Image (cartoon, rainbow, N blue to C red):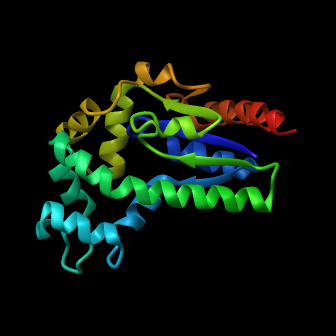
Amino acid sequence: MLRVGLTGGLATGKTFVGKALEELGCRLLSADELGRQALEPGRPGHHQAVEAFGPDILDGDGQIDRRKLGSVVFGDPGKLSILNSIVHPAVIAAEEQWIRRVEGEDPHSIAVVEAAILIETGSYKRFEKLILTVCGEEQQIARAIKRDGLTRDEVLDRLKRQMPINEKRKYADYVIDTSGDKDLTLAQVRQIYGGLRSLTV
């Protein structure tokens, strides 16, 4: 089985590329979804996050409001580090469990884990190949505003705290430029999928 990491900066098209790879035959797991699950009520991460950041991060139903939590941690590297220490161990354990299950079901599969900060956390080392999605900064800003309802300043603040794209390129085995139309992106995905598939034969 081939382990593949899929990463990229904010709003660079990771999810779109991940779904395209899945449609081509890869197995796909969203680490961001695992991160959300780790903070659900009843999970240890929920209690730890409320203890660390206070009850103001909760909505009326007792769920963690991700936007409120984001406003607390993204402006403070220390608090972001605390949040990562709560979420990441649970996410990595769930990823490894999923990878083992996929390998048991199909030893020739391509297991793709989509995650925003694979490089920053060092998790990229757990994968045999790394795909990076990129686009222009103004596109990132426009996409994030449209998708997440963030202000321009909120997006710029988040971008400022991410590793620069050119730095991430040094770690990538494959780079997909999503700045063009979807067909151009899909053409790149198909080409990369062919390369990945050849490694599993």
Q: Nearer the viewer, residue 147 or 39?
A: 39
Q: Position of residue 74 (x, y in %)?
A: 21, 44
Residue visible at 20% across and 73% down in the picture: 59
Q: Position of residue 132 (x, y in %)?
A: 53, 31
Residue visible at 80% across and 34% down in the picture: 199
Q: Position of residue 96 (x, y in %)?
A: 58, 55
Q: Please determine whether, in this image, residue 179 is positioned above or below residue 69.
A: above
Q: Please determine whether, in this image, residue 82 is positioned above or below residue 9.
A: below
Q: Please determine whether, in this image, residue 100 is positioned above or below residue 41.
A: above
Residue 152 visible in the shown view: yes
Q: Where is residue 81, by image quadrant?
A: top left
Q: Nearer the viewer, residue 173 or 22?
A: 173
Q: Position of residue 46 (x, y in %)?
A: 29, 70
Q: Where is residue 101, by image quadrant?
A: bottom right
Q: Residue furthest right?
A: 201
Residue visible at 67% across and 45% down in the picture: 21
**Quarter of the figure that contains the C terminus:** top right
| Left-right relation of 73 to 42 | left
| Left-right relation of 146 to 150 | right
Q: Please determine whether, in this image, residue 160 is positioned above or below residue 127.
A: above
| Left-right relation of 69 to 135 | left
Residue 64 visible in the shown view: no
Q: Nearer the viewer, residue 166 or 88?
A: 88
